[in-house]
Amino acid sequence: MWRPSIPILMQFDSRLALLAVVIALSPRVVASQDPILVPQPRELQSAGPVFRVLSTTRIVLVDDLPDDRFAARSLQEELKMVAGSSLPIVPAAGDRADAIVLGRIENSTIRRLLLRHHLETNGLDEQGYVLDVQQDQVLVAGKDAAGLFYGVQTLRQLMVGNNRQVDILGVRVRDWPAMIYRGTQVDLSRGPVPKLDYLKRIVRTIAEFKMNQLNLYIEDAFPMEGQPLVGVLDDTLSHSDFKELVAYAAPYHVEIITIWRPTTPLPRNSWNSSTGKQIRSLLRRSITSGVTRPTSSAPGAAPHAFSKPATARFMPSVSIGPIKLCVATTSER
């Protein structure tokens, strides 16, 4: 059974069932032998025979870089779940067959394999990758760290089988994102505040489908030192929770962006009022290093957004590391 997955708005752990319905209802399933991948790659063609995963198969990591090893481990975990056994991750040693080779296009070993596989990399943008599944070898080559990670996520969707026999569908892929930033938003201010483990699960799910931003909308779900009436509820996320989430999301190439809105409405054009001046003062004091970049200001929106590593704090005395902050105010007509 083909086992890719798709993100779900409400339940991130029901992805397999939903994707099975999508595939079953798609006319392409009948009309084409090409696999359905989510998101659909820019260039995809079936390449013929499958690659059979055997007990002798190895995951070859050409460069032992931290981001690349993280991508290799995600593949190793998927293979263990599908095949029932863990394949070792080994360094490159010659041109071995029966291997899944992972690396970056800039590496000389990868460039030689690209020539052997007749793969073209011209025009491949940032976060892009090429993937080629042949009968004796699988090659995933990323333009950069994110590209290699996304190529591995596509490869995970191509696995077919069960504990007795696992195949990787024979395809050739060239892919890169149409938009640099792709993401989703979670509202932390209405209903129960999601716990840290649930937010981590969202990070894993959106990264699998090549999203790279998680926007967290915050009103009263974050305690602020010096602001006793903010974040007084029992189910708020702590400073350490946000720090841990940012660090957890980094190897998944997901950036955490908080969108904070004061709970007290500000009338339209009142950014120069006493309350507006107080918020602007808080913003100025929160900047510790880096640069602020102006944003297009819709009516009632604050005129600043902080881009990592622009600030180590998003409010006074609240240190949460490399994170983006957008501050918005509520407008009243």
Image (tube, grey):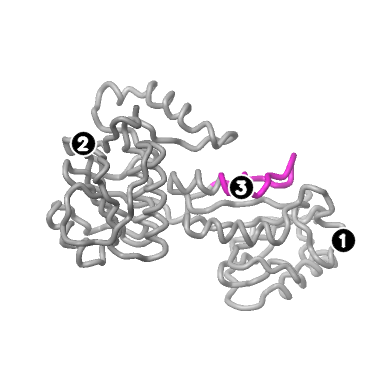
State yes or no: residue 193 in magenta: yes
Label pair 1/3, CB-CB below 8 angstroms: no
Disc with the residue nearer the chain's start (2 vs 3): 2
Q: Earlier in the sequence, mark 1 or mark 2?
A: 2
Q: Which residues are magenta?
A: 184-201
Q: Percent position (x, y) of residue 306?
A: 61, 67
Real-space CA distance between mark 1 and mark 2, rounded to the nearest whole angstrom:
61 Å
Q: Residue at x 50, y 43 (%)?
A: 205
Give the labeled residue for mark 1: 228
User: Which dot, 1 or 3, sits closer to the camera?
Assistant: 3
Disc 3 residue type (three-letter): Leu
Q: Which element is circle 3 on? A: helix
Q: Name which residue type carries label 1.
A: Pro
Residue 186 lies, in percent from the top left, at: 63, 45
Dot 2 surroundings within 10 Å: few (below 14), some, or many (20 or more)? many
- CA gap between label 2 and label 3 equals 36 Å
Q: CA distance from mark 1 to mark 3?
A: 26 Å
In the depicted view, which residue is nearer to us: 100 or 227?
100
Q: Which residue is mark 3?
A: 199
* Residue at which label 2 appears: 50
Whether 286 is drawn above or below 114: the answer is below
Residue 254, given in percent of the width and then of the height, sits at: 51, 55
Q: How far across and how far down the image is residue 284, in percent?
A: 71, 74
